[in-house]
Image: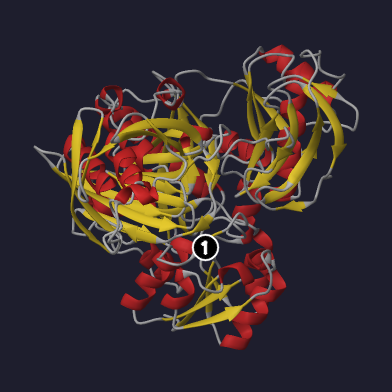
């Protein structure tokens, strides 16, 4: 076994790999870019080396140079970035560095969907019958789509992870979706070739973990269901996959082993399938560790990272297929910096406070964040994973729901509250989940709870300021007083206006609606309120004009309004269109002098590996367009200045 390991990645996966490396007695070497200088993985490594600016994780030459200079004997690529790039595996081999992953040939075949499909057909692995050959010609691809019949999937030939993937419902939507998919694939993989496939409604996304050693042994693990997705990105994964017939599960396992053998696989990999009511077909093979690998570890007791390292060092697998059996049920939720109420828009900012559930043999936290670090827009939105185990599915789901309800992260928006709602949904509890599940439940409102509004109102009303010796009413600037002792407080909660009537009773108490809230204790970021029959514990941080409040896993930002314009609108008071978060301009859909209608896409930003369409809030005319593709913009940057709207004209020819 080698002794010095370079982890060529960042965030929670870098921390995860280094955790096993420490247990095995390996010396871990981290790399970091300028935005990640203060990141958690840097502090957890035995040593850390700079690799330059934000794109350093994609610089093979720089990574190999650091490996040589640091004396690393092996390199673990994590997932994402270069993990499936055969050029990195070849560079390691040329430099005498052990690559903790499969041979370059396997990644090269499986990295292109057309070549992967051909190899799977030859190996007898079931594949989709409705598949069109790739073409650089948009008209040819449209003809393929028409032949297949809408809805269809536009899919990048290269890469994976949901990038360069679009579902298209109609012929009219096809051109824009294809442009967007090509643009995203070109940026992510340097390859804009596309395939067209039939969209299979009410299908499930099930994958099979495999391990293969150099002696030819290939083993498969119980299937993982990854059907709960948004923008083709998984949010909740579990194993064993619920409700599948035993015969189908065994057939998928055998197909996964056949897929791995077909490319002489080595190490840990995952074969993904689309599953219908009575059949399954090959989707792709991820030639790396998966984000959701912990659920397989929880039900088998096998450390997959450890066996990645052991196999890379030449060791043989020490068990047979019959010994890999699921013990109970495991489920994972991906905690992301994003706002579900704004179509899962990525969120950036500084983490002012975090509180994670306590780990146990039945509850695991894989995290890449800590207090004080900044979540930037340069990388994806994944911050941590919460994984729960139970004797059965219901126990595991309940444990995960409880854990999500007890965590808090203040400073960026997160999807924790949304994930908890999904886990508590009756349909999910029954196991009746497919890839369309989130579309059926995502519109359920996630309004701020009354206790969150009360905490913010008490702050703005002066009740939480225990050091003030004066009357609390001195803090109530901007209120409209109604009567002797009550007022209407104008707030913006998560960017949306919310007026609340507050009655101050004394220095510790106020009435909001029919409830009387009393401050029990405020210590650091902890706030305890008494609401008569209940005592409620919240996390509470004030940063400038914003109050960050978290309760039962749901975090909210509250600001006192001083005008009728709510904070967080995508247009300024003048009507100008501004960037809602830092990012890079991917496309501009408007020209100077063009008219537009409400809902028209004006600019497309890319942030956290996601394309975000900036739409018009109303009708108007573009007076000036201040950006062009490739520009880097910060939150609040003016994208389009807007002339006074006329009567909702028809869109300009775009």
Percent across and percent down for residue 116 are: 62, 41
Q: Give the farthest residue toward the left.
A: 533
Q: Is residue 209 left or right of residue 605?
A: left
Q: Is residue 581 above or below residue 157?
A: below
- Characterize the local packing of mark 1: few (<14), some (14-19) or many (20 or more) Cα atoms within 10 angstroms: some
Q: Position of residue 379 (x, y in %)?
A: 59, 56
Which element is circle 1 on?
A: strand
Q: Residue at x 29, y 22 (%)?
A: 427
Residue 550, placed above or below residue 200: below
What residue do we see at 80% from left, 50% from top?
630
Observer able to see residue 223:
no
Residue 640 in sight from this viewpoint: yes
In this picture, residue 634 sits left or right of residue 457: right
> Looking at the figure, which quarter contains the C terminus?
top right
On screen, residue 386 versus residue 557, left or right, reads left
Position of 86 relative to 430 (above/below): below
Q: Nearer the viewer, residue 478 or 638?
A: 478
Residue 213 position (above or below residue 530):
below
* Residue 616 image position (x, y, % from top left): 71, 27
Location of the N terminus by quadrant is bottom left
The way the protein has been coloured in the rendering is secondary structure
- How many marks the image carries: the answer is 1
Residue 522 falls in image quadrant = bottom left
For this orientation, the residue located farthest to the right is 593
Q: Residue under label 1, please give it.
A: 374
Whole-percent x and y of residue 579? 68, 43
In the image, 253 versus 353, the foreground residue is 353
Closer to us: 231 or 557: 557
């Amino acid at each position: 076994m080698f002794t010095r390991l370079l982890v060529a990645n960042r965030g929670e996966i870098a921390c995860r790999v280094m955790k096993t490396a420490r247990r095995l007695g390996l010396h871990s070497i981290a790399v970091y870019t300028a935005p990640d200088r203060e990141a958690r993985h840097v502090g957890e490594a035995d040593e850390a080396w700079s690799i330059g600016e934000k794109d350093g994780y994609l610089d093979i030459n720089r990574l190999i140079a650091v490996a040589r200079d640091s004396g690393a004997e092996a390199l673990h690529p994590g997932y994402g970035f270069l993990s499936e790039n055969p050029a990195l595996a070849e560079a390691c081999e040329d430099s005498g560095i052990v690559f903790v992953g499969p041979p370059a040939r396997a990644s090269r075949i499986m990295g292109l969907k057309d070549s992967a499909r051909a190899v799977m057909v030859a190996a007898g692995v079931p594949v989709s019958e409705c598949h069109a050959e790739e073409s650089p010609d948009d008209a040819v691809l449209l003809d393929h789509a028409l032949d297949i019949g809408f809805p269809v999937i536009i899919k990048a030939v290269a890469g994976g992870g949901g990038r360069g993937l679009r579902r298209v419902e109609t012929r009219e939507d096809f051109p824009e979706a294809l442009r967007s998919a090509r643009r995203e694939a070109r940026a992510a993989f340097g390859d804009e070739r596309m395939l067209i496939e039939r969209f299979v409604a009410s299908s499930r996304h099930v994958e099979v973990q495999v391990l293969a050693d150099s002696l030819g042994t290939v083993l498969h693990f119980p299937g993982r269901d990854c059907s709960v997705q948004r923008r083709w990105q998984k949010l909740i994964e579990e194993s064993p996959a619920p409700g599948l017939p035993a015969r189908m599960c065994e057939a998928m396992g055998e197909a996964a082993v056949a897929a791995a053998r077909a490319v002489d696989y080595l190490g840990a990999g995952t074969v993904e399938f689309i599953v219908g009511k009575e059949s399954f077909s090959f989707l792709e093979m991820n030639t790396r560790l998966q984000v959701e690998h912990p659920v397989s570890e929880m039900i088998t007791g096998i450390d997959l990272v450890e066996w990645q390292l052991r196999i890379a060092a030449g060791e043989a697998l020490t068990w047979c297929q019959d010994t890999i059996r699921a013990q109970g049920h495991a489920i994972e939720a991906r905690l992301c910096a994003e706002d579900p109420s704004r179509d899962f828009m990525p969120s950036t900012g500084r983490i002012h406070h975090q509180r994670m559930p306590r780990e146990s043999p039945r509850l695991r936290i894989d995290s890449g964040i800590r207090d004080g670090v900044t979540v930037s827009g340069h990388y994806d939105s994944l911050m941590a994973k919460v994984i729960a185990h139970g004797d059965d599915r219901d126990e595991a789901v309940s444990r995960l729901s409880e854990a999500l309800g007890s965590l808090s992260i203040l400073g960026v928006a997160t999807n924790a509250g949304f994930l908890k709602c999904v886990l508590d949904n009756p349909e999910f509890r029954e196991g009746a989940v497919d890839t369309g599940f989130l579309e059926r439940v995502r519109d359920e409102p996630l309004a701020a709870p009354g206790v969150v509004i009360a905490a913010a109102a008490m702050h703005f009303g002066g009740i939480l300021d225990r050091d003030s010796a004066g009357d609390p009413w001195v803090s109530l600037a901007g209120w409209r007083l109604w009567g002797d002792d009550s007022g209407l407080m104008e707030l913006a909660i998560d960017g949306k206006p919310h007026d609340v009537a507050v009655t101050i009773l004394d220095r510790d108490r106020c009435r909001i609606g029919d409830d009387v809230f009393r401050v029990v204790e405020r210590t650091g970021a902890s706030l305890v309120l008494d609401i008569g029959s209940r005592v409620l514990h919240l996390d509470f941080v004030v940063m400038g004009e914003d109050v960050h409040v978290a309760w039962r896993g749901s975090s909210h930002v509250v600001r006192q309004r001083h005008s009728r314009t709510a904070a967080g609108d995508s247009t300024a008071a003048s009507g100008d269109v501004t960037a809602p978060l830092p990012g890079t301009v991917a496309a501009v859909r408007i020209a100077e002098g063009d008219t537009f209608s409400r809902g028209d896409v004006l600019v497309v930003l890319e942030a956290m590996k996601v394309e975000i369409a900036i739409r018009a809030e109303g009708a108007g005319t573009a007076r000036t367009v201040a950006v062009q593709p490739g520009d880097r913009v910060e939150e609040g940057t003016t994208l389009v200045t807007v002339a006074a709207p006329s009567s909702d004209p028809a869109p300009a020819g775009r």
